[in-house]
Image (cartoon, grey):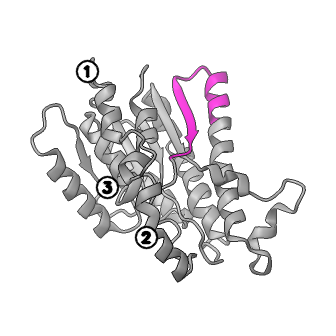
Amino acid sequence: GLFGGKRALEVVKEYSKDGRPIKGKVAVVTGANNGAGFETAHALAVAGARVILAGRRLDAIKEAIRSIQDKLGNAENAGSVEMIPDVPLDLEDLQNVRNYAKEFQKLGCPLHLLVLNAGVMAQPFRLSPQGHESTWAINHLGHFLLCQLLMDKLRASQPARVICVSSELHRSAPNPDQEFSNWTHPEKYSLMEAYGASKLSNILMAKELARRFHDQKLDIIAVSLHPGVGPTGLAKEGLSGVLIGLYRAIGGMILFSHEQLAATSTFCCVAPPF
């Protein structure tokens, strides 16, 4: 974009001058098959981490792994990328999230970095298999459950970090004075209120986790972040053809690239002290 901004690999380079701070660490990145999630996974692997890519579409995750492996080549001190074989992560379905966490436990490895990146935006109204509004289910509730199910792993792997990718659009969440459940009914549903509520939930989750980790004297950091505004695929379902055309025409001039969108998540993973 016109306004610059560091790229994820530039962040890794800056914090690798005195060695690789996350070399050998294990990271899980959700929504890692494309966009900022892909670039975050790539950057963490360059920084030396063992990165497990998680996503709903197994074919897309496999392709992302091949692509990152090609980029890594035989780079010195590079980490690795992988997936849990034949195990998708569908954050909309809580039973699927439970199964993913169970399969992760079977790997027998630690978990140092949990990057909760996956998300959707501006979706038409629908309910999840468990009856929750889908945007909130995917962006927050699935991530919340995944984090809780992997909490013992995080505790056992200290120091560890939980990174919640939120958005400045958390400000579009429903007014607290209104009925918070308004956006869960088809006749009252607002695309942006639903998205805002999910992103506000990400922030509140990170703040509460940070408070509890501090009170329990755990060496675990929890943060939330706004990655910037860029050409993600989050809003494809809910945008009109006119808006999509405008987005494609001028987006490259004013928006962050995927590499720039991944920079803050990468910083939260590699910045000292670890």
Disc tally is 3
The reply to whether dot 2 and dot 1 touch (C-beta < 8 Å) is no
Image quadrant of residue 60?
Answer: bottom left
Label 1 belongs to which residue?
A: 19
What residue range appears in magenta? 209-227
Q: Nearer the viewer, residue 56 or 135?
A: 135
Distance from Cα at disc 3 to Cα at disc 1:
29 Å
Identity of the residue drawn at 50% across and 57% down: 98
Q: Secondary structure at mark 3?
A: loop
- In this rendering, the answer to whether 155 lies above or below 125 is above
Distance from Cα at disc 2 to Cα at disc 1:
41 Å
Q: Tag 3: residue type?
A: Ile
Asked if the stretch drawn in magenta spans residue 211, the answer is yes
Quadrant in which the C terminus is drawn:
top left
Label 2 belongs to which residue?
A: 249
Q: Secondary structure at mark 1?
A: loop
Identity of the residue drawn at 68% across and 58% down: 196
Q: Nearer the viewer, residue 172 or 137?
A: 172
Image check: 76 left or right of 188? left
Distance from Cα at disc 2 to Cα at disc 3:
38 Å
Image depth: mark 2 or mark 3 in front: 2
Q: Tag 1: residue type?
A: Gly
Asked if the stretch drawn in magenta spans residue 198, the answer is no
The first of marks 2 and 3 along the sequence is 3
Label 3 belongs to which residue?
A: 84
Image depth: mark 2 or mark 1 in front: 2
Q: Tag 2: residue type?
A: Ala
